[in-house]
Image (cartoon, helix red, strand yellow):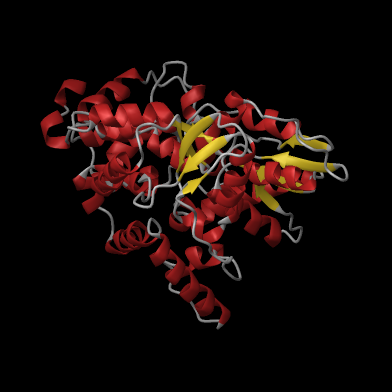
Amino acid sequence: MLHQIDTRKHGPNAENMAEQVKTCVHCGFCLPVCPTYQVLGEEMDSPRGRIVLMKGVLEENLQITDALPYLDRCLGCLACVPACPSGVRYEELIGPFRALPEVRQSRPASDRLVRLLIENVLPHPVRFRAAARLGIRFRALGKLAPSSIAPLLALLPDRLPKQRRLPEIQPALGKRRAKVGLVAGCAQEVLAPDINDACLRVLARNGVEVVIPRNQGCCGALALHTGAADQARALARNNLGAFPRDVDAIIATAAGCGSGMKEYGLLFKGDRDEDRAREFVSKVRDVTMFLDELGLVDPLPALPRPWKVAYHDACHLLHAQGIREAPRRLLRSIPNLELVDVPDGETCCGSAGTYNMEQPEIARELGTRKAQNILAIGAEALAAGNIGCLVQIQKLLAASGHPLPVYHTIQVLALAYHSG
């Protein structure tokens, strides 16, 4: 029974976890939309099955080690949330459960080591850039990588793009219509710095002044994904103080960052910074949502030739934030651009934060399906709203023998402005 869950033992989120467990009526609507259930066909690899497992662990009727393999295979894509007729907030279960100290301590030493590397390298651009350069050289020399880091090396590009220092303030062009703060991101700044450059150009052209705080850091989403709640809270607390309070919005260009920051209310529940966190969350906007709400100053110029572009829904944009139409409206406003949806587009590509490093086989299966669906519609390029998706899909398109250019939605808008 749920009253057997010791909320004092399991920490501040245990009461909310117990409520979400109770909300699930085990109807099964989540099964067909769950990517791991699609691939593996196992009840325990579905949201409904995982909720049963979490309940068993919380009530101390099940050993953590028996539940962990199934829970670790969860992508955290949240496709189950909009599909659930009972309103189970699955994100308020899987993240807090992974953060339980007894769960983190129960993983094998090799898994803990990989997570420790992820938590201490990826959120720090300087460290990640240095590690990526070393990894690219290691791979180029044909060295046999340890199995634990081989999936990470496989995702790295052949060379890193040139870095440039972002300005602290990007003034608006013409009359200022809004002032926003920009989340610079971590992995994105290393792997695709042009996304932020494109964002600054497009926002400035639309009368938006952009502030990029020097003392901001990782949003904490990667730490939340791996269950490092204390680290996530420390990173988040830094950002609460870094961004000025007079901005109209806090802009994210990575769906994972936007989704992670929108969890600050839960992360700081009962904390001294809870009110500040809720104020912060109220201003978080994905860049496409912000531009769609603000409206473009002028019509976008026509592209020099017709261009067929597929749009991929990043899970943490579509499922976690409920943003579907805003990026499509912006892309469809570009003359000569034909926007096409990817078949089975609501299913995860397998990137899912650090999932393609932790569960590479399942991630590869999902990514291969996504690449095949993109190629089936004859697209000339792909647009998406998350750096992890872009890296994952680009690699698997190339592996299929049919590489395509991939762009963030904001980069496509910047290309359109440049063409005019």
Q: Is residue 327 visible?
A: yes
Q: Position of residue 409 (x, y in %)?
A: 64, 41
Q: Residue furthest front?
A: 174
Query: Which residue is located at x 61 percent, y 36 percent?
Result: 313
User: Which residue is found at the position 53% from the left and 51% from the top?
Assistant: 362
In this picture, is 251 found above or below 323?
Answer: below
- Where in the figure is residue 9, as x and y percent of width and height? 12, 35
Q: Residue at x 47, y 31 (%)?
A: 320
Residue furthest left in the image: 8
379 is higher (above) or lower (below) than 115 = above
Where the N terminus falls, by quadrant? top left
Which residue occupies the extreme top position in the image? 86
Taking the spot 39% from the left edge, 32% from the top edge, the residue there is 262
- Against 287, is 390 above or below? below
> Which of the image's four quarters has the C terminus?
top right
Residue 268, horizontal then vertical, whole percent: 25, 33
The number of numbered discs placed on residues in the rendered structure image is 0
On the image, the x and y values in percent for residue 45 come to 44, 39
In this view of the protein, which residue sits in the foreground, 223 or 3? 223
Q: Report the front residue among 211 and 61.
A: 211
From where the camera sits, is residue 32 visible? no
**Left/right of residue 150 with respect to residue 25 in the rendered view:** right
Looking at this view, is 54 or 143 the one in front? 143
Left or right position of 82 against 238: right
State left or right for residue 312 relative to residue 143: right
